[in-house]
Image: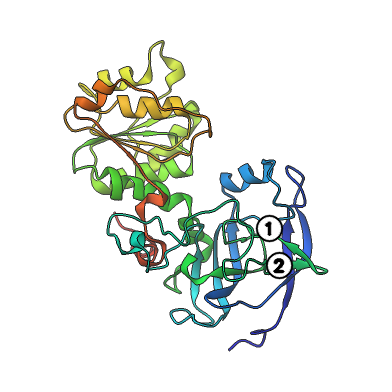
């Protein structure tokens, strides 16, 4: 039992007081964890574009502590928490796994009814209150994690217990973007050894998707991005060829179809751009091609394609967090990193 268990902890946090305004390092009070909650000392946190998106957004939930891609150590646990104890190394995750609902009991889904991502909720489920405050004023949580704080309180279902030997400064990125891209390829697209794969968008998620294709044994991994400077980095993650749509005067799906004798076997879309999504679907081969959408589009975006593209036996799939169940699956993803899976 830690010396701070059951007490309010005062620590520093980066607080967003209003949309788009610079975060301010403040001293905050972090209340003890309640039932099914865990207080975590955050050692490393990275910045994900989702943090930036909601920091800029004109939603009413301010002041707020952002951050959701992180690694830390359990400081104390609330009542009812049995599978974590102080000292355990954990990855907080923006979505959860209650292990009780229909989604959690399904082998196909990771979209927990209780704990799936909710960007509109700024309080804890247990009592509808925040665990953060400054001079008695509540500070809202973000996606149940709020890792831009030295200490945070998280529902036990949103914490993956991992190998304590894993370097938290490296594996913290597995709690969001890297697992999302890796899982989109390995768990959803499932390319066969020797197959061809196109990856749209070569940011962190797309690089992880390319890495998944490399691990699966794809023979050709075609990176698609509007920024040609990204190809050098993408080669390290398995990309074998690069296509910049700006270099052609025809749709990129036609370019890829010509390069691959009718289309790739699998494609993974990691941009959230609706045109890229359509291209990713239309560039897969008829008869067996599968396209997987990962990026989150603009709320008014509409996906348009001719129904014949589906009737000609192409498959369109979506994925959320790479189809990984956070508590059940993330520890093994960390082990893949630890064993440097080839």
Residue 249 in picture, x, y percent from top left: 41, 10
Q: Horizontally, is 303 left or right of 313 in the view?
A: right
Residue 54 in picture, x, y percent from top left: 63, 45
Q: Quadrant of residue 252?
A: top left
Q: Quadrant of residue 109?
A: bottom left
The residue that appears at 49% across and 73% down in the rendered structure is 89
The residue to which callout 2 is attached is 132
Q: Is residue 266 above or below residue 212?
A: above
- Which mark, residue 65? 1
Residue 176 in picture, x, y percent from top left: 48, 53
In front here: 228 or 17? 17
In front here: 158 or 22? 158
Mark 1 and mark 2 in contact (Cβ < 8 Å)? yes
Q: Quadrant location of the N terminus? A: bottom right
Number of on-image labels: 2
Point out the residue furthest to the left here: 287
Secondary element at tag 2: strand
- Which mark, residue 216? none
Q: Horizontally, is 203 left or right of 122 in the view?
A: left
Q: Quadrant location of the C terminus? A: bottom left
The residue that appears at 24% across and 40% down in the rendered structure is 218
Specify whether residue 285 is in view.
no
Label 2 – label 1 distance at C-alpha: 9 Å
Specify whether residue 324 is in view.
yes
Secondary element at tag 1: loop
Residue 210 in picture, x, y percent from top left: 36, 41
In front here: 125 or 84? 125
The residue that appears at 39% across and 62% down in the rendered structure is 330
Point out the residue furthest to the right here: 135
Q: Which sits earlier in the primary sequence, circle 2 or circle 1?
A: 1
Q: Horizontally, is 31 left or right of 325 in the view?
A: right
């Amino acid at each position: 039992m830690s010396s701070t268990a059951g007490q309010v902890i005062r620590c520093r946090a980066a607080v967003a007081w209003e949309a788009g305004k610079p975060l301010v390092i403040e001293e905050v009070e972090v209340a003890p964890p309640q039932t099914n909650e865990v207080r975590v000392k955050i050692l490393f946190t990275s910045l994900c574009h989702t943090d930036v998106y909601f920091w800029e957004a004109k939603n009413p939930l301010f002041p707020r502590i952002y951050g959701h891609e992180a690694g830390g150590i359990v400081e104390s646990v609330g009542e009812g928490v049995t599978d974590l104890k102080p000292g355990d190394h954990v990855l907080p995750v923006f979505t959860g796994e209650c292990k009780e609902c229909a989604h959690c009991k399904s082998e196909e889904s990771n979209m927990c009814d209780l704990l799936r991502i909710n960007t509109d909720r700024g309080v804890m489920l247990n009592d509808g209150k925040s665990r953060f405050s400054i001079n008695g004023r509540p500070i809202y949580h973000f996606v149940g994690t709020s890792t831009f704080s030295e200490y945070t309180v998280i529902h036990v279902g949103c914490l993956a217990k991992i190998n304590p030997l894993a370097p938290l400064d490296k594996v913290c990125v597995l709690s969001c973007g890297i697992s999302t891209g890796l899982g989109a390829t390995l768990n959803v697209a499932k390319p066969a050894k020797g197959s061809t794969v196109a990856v749209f968008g070569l940011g962190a998620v797309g690089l992880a998707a390319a890495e998944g294709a490399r691990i699966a044994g794809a023979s050709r991994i075609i990176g698609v991005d509007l920024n040609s400077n990204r190809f050098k980095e993408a080669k390290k993650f398995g990309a074998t060829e690069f296509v910049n749509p700006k270099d052609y005067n025809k749709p990129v799906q036609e370019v890829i179809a010509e390069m691959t004798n009718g289309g790739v076997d699998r494609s993974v879309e990691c941009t959230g751009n609706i045109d890229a999504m359509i291209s990713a679907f239309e560039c897969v081969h008829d008869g067996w091609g599968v396209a997987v959408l990962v990026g989150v589009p603009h709320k008014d975006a509409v996906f348009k394609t001719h129904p014949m593209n589906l009737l000609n036996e192409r498959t369109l799939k979506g994925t959320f967090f790479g189809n990984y169940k956070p508590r059940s699956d993330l520890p093994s993803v960390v082990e893949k990193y630890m064993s440097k899976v080839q």
